[in-house]
Image (spheres, helix red, strand yellow):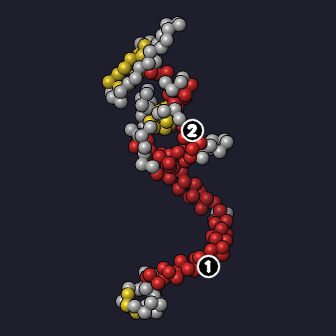
Amino acid sequence: MITCRVCKQEKERAKGQHSNVCGPCWQEYLRDYRRKNADRLREQDREEYMLKRKDPEWVKSEQRRGREYWHNLRREVFMAYGGFRCRCCGETEEKFLSIDHINNDGAEHRRELGYNSGNGKGASSKTLKWLKDNGFPSGFQVLCMNCNVGKARNGGVCPHQLKPREFGERPERIIPSQAELVTWIDGKYTVLKV
Protein backbone atom coordinates (compact mmCIF):
# COMPACT_ATOMS: atom_id res chain seq x y z
CA MET A 1 0.00 0.00 0.00
CA ILE A 2 1.16 3.51 -0.82
CA THR A 3 -0.14 7.01 -0.41
CA CYS A 4 -0.65 8.21 -3.98
CA ARG A 5 1.19 11.47 -4.63
CA VAL A 6 -1.54 12.54 -7.10
CA CYS A 7 -4.85 11.78 -5.35
CA LYS A 8 -3.36 11.59 -1.82
CA GLN A 9 -5.32 8.39 -1.05
CA GLU A 10 -3.92 5.13 0.27
CA LYS A 11 -4.11 2.56 -2.56
CA GLU A 12 -2.22 -0.22 -4.29
CA ARG A 13 0.77 0.86 -6.37
CA ALA A 14 0.26 0.79 -10.14
CA LYS A 15 1.50 -2.48 -11.66
CA GLY A 16 5.05 -2.10 -12.93
CA GLN A 17 5.46 1.30 -11.28
CA HIS A 18 8.06 2.13 -8.66
CA SER A 19 6.83 5.64 -7.93
CA ASN A 20 4.13 6.54 -5.44
CA VAL A 21 1.25 6.66 -7.94
CA CYS A 22 -1.87 4.48 -7.72
CA GLY A 23 -3.23 2.50 -10.68
CA PRO A 24 -6.18 4.78 -11.58
CA CYS A 25 -4.03 7.94 -11.43
CA TRP A 26 -1.32 6.31 -13.54
CA GLN A 27 -3.88 5.23 -16.18
CA GLU A 28 -5.30 8.76 -16.26
CA TYR A 29 -1.78 10.16 -16.74
CA LEU A 30 -1.11 7.73 -19.65
CA ARG A 31 -4.44 8.57 -21.35
CA ASP A 32 -3.69 12.29 -21.06
CA TYR A 33 -0.13 11.82 -22.35
CA ARG A 34 -1.30 9.80 -25.38
CA ARG A 35 -3.99 12.37 -26.16
CA LYS A 36 -1.52 15.31 -26.02
CA ASN A 37 1.19 13.49 -28.03
CA ALA A 38 -0.95 11.50 -30.50
CA ASP A 39 0.73 12.80 -33.67
CA ARG A 40 4.25 12.29 -32.36
CA LEU A 41 3.45 8.78 -31.08
CA ARG A 42 1.79 7.83 -34.38
CA GLU A 43 4.88 8.98 -36.32
CA GLN A 44 7.16 7.12 -33.90
CA ASP A 45 5.11 3.92 -34.39
CA ARG A 46 5.27 4.34 -38.17
CA GLU A 47 9.06 4.75 -38.09
CA GLU A 48 9.44 1.64 -35.90
CA TYR A 49 7.21 -0.30 -38.29
CA MET A 50 9.23 0.81 -41.33
CA LEU A 51 12.44 -0.33 -39.61
CA LYS A 52 10.89 -3.73 -38.87
CA ARG A 53 9.80 -4.07 -42.51
CA LYS A 54 13.48 -4.06 -43.50
CA ASP A 55 14.15 -7.18 -41.43
CA PRO A 56 13.39 -10.28 -43.58
CA GLU A 57 12.91 -12.48 -40.52
CA TRP A 58 10.26 -10.14 -39.11
CA VAL A 59 8.49 -10.03 -42.48
CA LYS A 60 8.46 -13.85 -42.67
CA SER A 61 7.12 -14.15 -39.13
CA GLU A 62 4.34 -11.64 -39.88
CA GLN A 63 3.42 -13.48 -43.07
CA ARG A 64 3.35 -16.77 -41.16
CA ARG A 65 1.23 -15.22 -38.41
CA GLY A 66 -1.21 -13.84 -41.00
CA ARG A 67 -1.52 -17.17 -42.80
CA GLU A 68 -2.16 -18.97 -39.49
CA TYR A 69 -4.82 -16.43 -38.52
CA TRP A 70 -6.76 -16.80 -41.80
CA HIS A 71 -6.33 -20.59 -41.83
CA ASN A 72 -7.73 -20.84 -38.29
CA LEU A 73 -10.57 -18.43 -39.10
CA ARG A 74 -11.50 -20.45 -42.20
CA ARG A 75 -11.43 -23.69 -40.19
CA GLU A 76 -13.64 -22.16 -37.49
CA VAL A 77 -16.20 -20.90 -40.02
CA PHE A 78 -16.33 -24.20 -41.90
CA MET A 79 -16.76 -26.15 -38.66
CA ALA A 80 -19.65 -23.84 -37.70
CA TYR A 81 -21.38 -24.70 -41.01
CA GLY A 82 -20.99 -28.47 -40.80
CA GLY A 83 -17.30 -29.13 -41.40
CA PHE A 84 -15.21 -29.72 -44.51
CA ARG A 85 -17.80 -31.57 -46.58
CA CYS A 86 -19.78 -30.30 -49.56
CA ARG A 87 -23.44 -30.34 -48.63
CA CYS A 88 -24.41 -31.32 -52.17
CA CYS A 89 -21.90 -33.86 -53.51
CA GLY A 90 -19.95 -34.81 -50.38
CA GLU A 91 -16.52 -33.56 -51.56
CA THR A 92 -14.10 -33.41 -48.61
CA GLU A 93 -10.93 -31.91 -50.16
CA GLU A 94 -10.49 -28.73 -48.10
CA LYS A 95 -8.99 -26.73 -50.99
CA PHE A 96 -12.06 -27.33 -53.17
CA LEU A 97 -14.62 -26.10 -50.61
CA SER A 98 -16.20 -22.68 -50.18
CA ILE A 99 -18.95 -20.95 -48.25
CA ASP A 100 -22.12 -20.47 -50.31
CA HIS A 101 -25.00 -18.04 -49.81
CA ILE A 102 -27.99 -20.42 -49.83
CA ASN A 103 -30.35 -17.78 -51.30
CA ASN A 104 -27.93 -16.92 -54.15
CA ASP A 105 -27.53 -13.36 -52.87
CA GLY A 106 -23.75 -13.37 -52.37
CA ALA A 107 -22.97 -10.44 -54.70
CA GLU A 108 -25.72 -8.35 -53.11
CA HIS A 109 -24.49 -9.26 -49.63
CA ARG A 110 -20.90 -8.27 -50.47
CA ARG A 111 -22.13 -4.96 -51.92
CA GLU A 112 -24.10 -4.23 -48.73
CA LEU A 113 -20.95 -4.86 -46.70
CA GLY A 114 -18.84 -2.77 -49.07
CA TYR A 115 -16.59 -5.69 -50.04
CA ASN A 116 -16.80 -5.29 -53.81
CA SER A 117 -13.77 -3.16 -54.58
CA GLY A 118 -14.01 -3.61 -58.31
CA ASN A 119 -11.67 -6.58 -58.48
CA GLY A 120 -13.23 -8.69 -55.72
CA LYS A 121 -9.92 -9.21 -53.92
CA GLY A 122 -10.26 -9.86 -50.22
CA ALA A 123 -14.03 -10.37 -50.29
CA SER A 124 -13.77 -14.04 -49.29
CA SER A 125 -11.63 -13.49 -46.19
CA LYS A 126 -13.68 -10.44 -45.18
CA THR A 127 -16.85 -12.51 -45.51
CA LEU A 128 -15.34 -15.22 -43.27
CA LYS A 129 -14.54 -12.58 -40.66
CA TRP A 130 -18.05 -11.11 -40.99
CA LEU A 131 -19.60 -14.57 -40.45
CA LYS A 132 -17.61 -15.07 -37.24
CA ASP A 133 -18.23 -11.53 -35.95
CA ASN A 134 -21.99 -12.01 -36.50
CA GLY A 135 -22.23 -15.36 -34.72
CA PHE A 136 -22.37 -17.60 -37.83
CA PRO A 137 -25.86 -16.60 -39.06
CA SER A 138 -28.06 -18.98 -41.02
CA GLY A 139 -28.33 -18.66 -44.80
CA PHE A 140 -24.89 -20.10 -45.58
CA GLN A 141 -23.62 -23.59 -46.38
CA VAL A 142 -20.44 -25.42 -47.39
CA LEU A 143 -20.25 -26.31 -51.09
CA CYS A 144 -17.39 -27.39 -53.30
CA MET A 145 -16.48 -24.97 -56.07
CA ASN A 146 -18.07 -27.22 -58.71
CA CYS A 147 -21.41 -27.22 -56.92
CA ASN A 148 -21.14 -23.51 -56.08
CA VAL A 149 -20.42 -22.50 -59.70
CA GLY A 150 -22.93 -25.04 -61.06
CA LYS A 151 -25.59 -23.58 -58.75
CA ALA A 152 -24.76 -20.05 -59.90
CA ARG A 153 -24.95 -21.00 -63.59
CA ASN A 154 -28.07 -23.11 -63.22
CA GLY A 155 -30.53 -20.68 -61.65
CA GLY A 156 -29.73 -21.54 -58.03
CA VAL A 157 -29.89 -25.34 -58.41
CA CYS A 158 -26.76 -27.46 -58.46
CA PRO A 159 -26.68 -29.82 -61.46
CA HIS A 160 -26.19 -32.68 -58.96
CA GLN A 161 -29.72 -32.05 -57.74
CA LEU A 162 -31.27 -32.57 -61.17
CA LYS A 163 -32.35 -35.99 -62.37
CA PRO A 164 -31.09 -36.93 -65.84
CA ARG A 165 -33.67 -36.11 -68.47
CA GLU A 166 -34.64 -37.13 -71.94
CA PHE A 167 -34.19 -34.58 -74.68
CA GLY A 168 -36.86 -31.89 -74.38
CA GLU A 169 -38.08 -32.91 -70.92
CA ARG A 170 -38.02 -30.49 -68.03
CA PRO A 171 -35.61 -31.67 -65.30
CA GLU A 172 -37.00 -32.79 -61.96
CA ARG A 173 -35.23 -31.36 -58.96
CA ILE A 174 -33.91 -33.66 -56.22
CA ILE A 175 -33.75 -31.93 -52.85
CA PRO A 176 -31.73 -34.03 -50.41
CA SER A 177 -32.14 -33.65 -46.68
CA GLN A 178 -29.05 -33.02 -44.59
CA ALA A 179 -28.73 -36.78 -43.97
CA GLU A 180 -28.83 -37.62 -47.68
CA LEU A 181 -26.32 -37.30 -50.46
CA VAL A 182 -27.10 -37.18 -54.18
CA THR A 183 -24.49 -38.95 -56.29
CA TRP A 184 -24.04 -40.40 -59.79
CA ILE A 185 -24.06 -44.21 -59.75
CA ASP A 186 -24.31 -46.50 -62.79
CA GLY A 187 -25.37 -43.71 -65.15
CA LYS A 188 -28.09 -42.19 -62.96
CA TYR A 189 -28.48 -39.92 -59.95
CA THR A 190 -29.11 -41.78 -56.72
CA VAL A 191 -30.00 -40.46 -53.26
CA LEU A 192 -27.86 -42.14 -50.61
CA LYS A 193 -28.50 -42.10 -46.87
CA VAL A 194 -25.48 -40.76 -44.98
Judge whether 21 appears above or below 141 on screen.
below
- Kindly check if marks 1 and 2 are in contact, taking CB atoms under 8 A apart as contact: no
Q: Where is residue 156 in the image (x, y as percent from the top left)?
A: 51, 26
What amino acid type should be assigned to the residue bearing mark 1? Answer: Lys
Judge whether 83 appears above or below 18 on screen.
above
Quarter of the figure with residue 115: top right
What amino acid type should be assigned to the residue bearing mark 2? Answer: Glu
In the displayed image of the protein, which residue is found farthest to the top?
167
Classify mark 2: helix, strand or loop.
Answer: helix
Check the picture and name the quadrant holding the N terminus: bottom left
Q: Name the residue under label 2.
A: 108
Judge whether 53 appears above or below 67 on screen.
below
- Looking at the picture, tell me which residue is in the foreground, 24 or 59: 24
The tag earlier along the polypeptide, 1 or 2, is 1
Within-10-Å neighbours for mark 2: few <14, some 14–19, many 20+: few
Q: Can residue 123 be seen in this view?
A: no
Identify the residue at image location x=40%, y=91%: 9
Q: How far apart are marks 1 and 2 (CA)?
A: 43 Å
Q: Name the residue under label 1.
A: 36
Quarter of the figure with residue 42: bottom right
Q: Is residue 5 visible?
A: yes
Classify mark 1: helix, strand or loop.
Answer: helix
Quarter of the figure with residue 118: top right
Q: Where is residue 145 in the image (x, y as percent from the top left)?
A: 52, 31
Identify the residue at image location x=47%, y=46%: 131
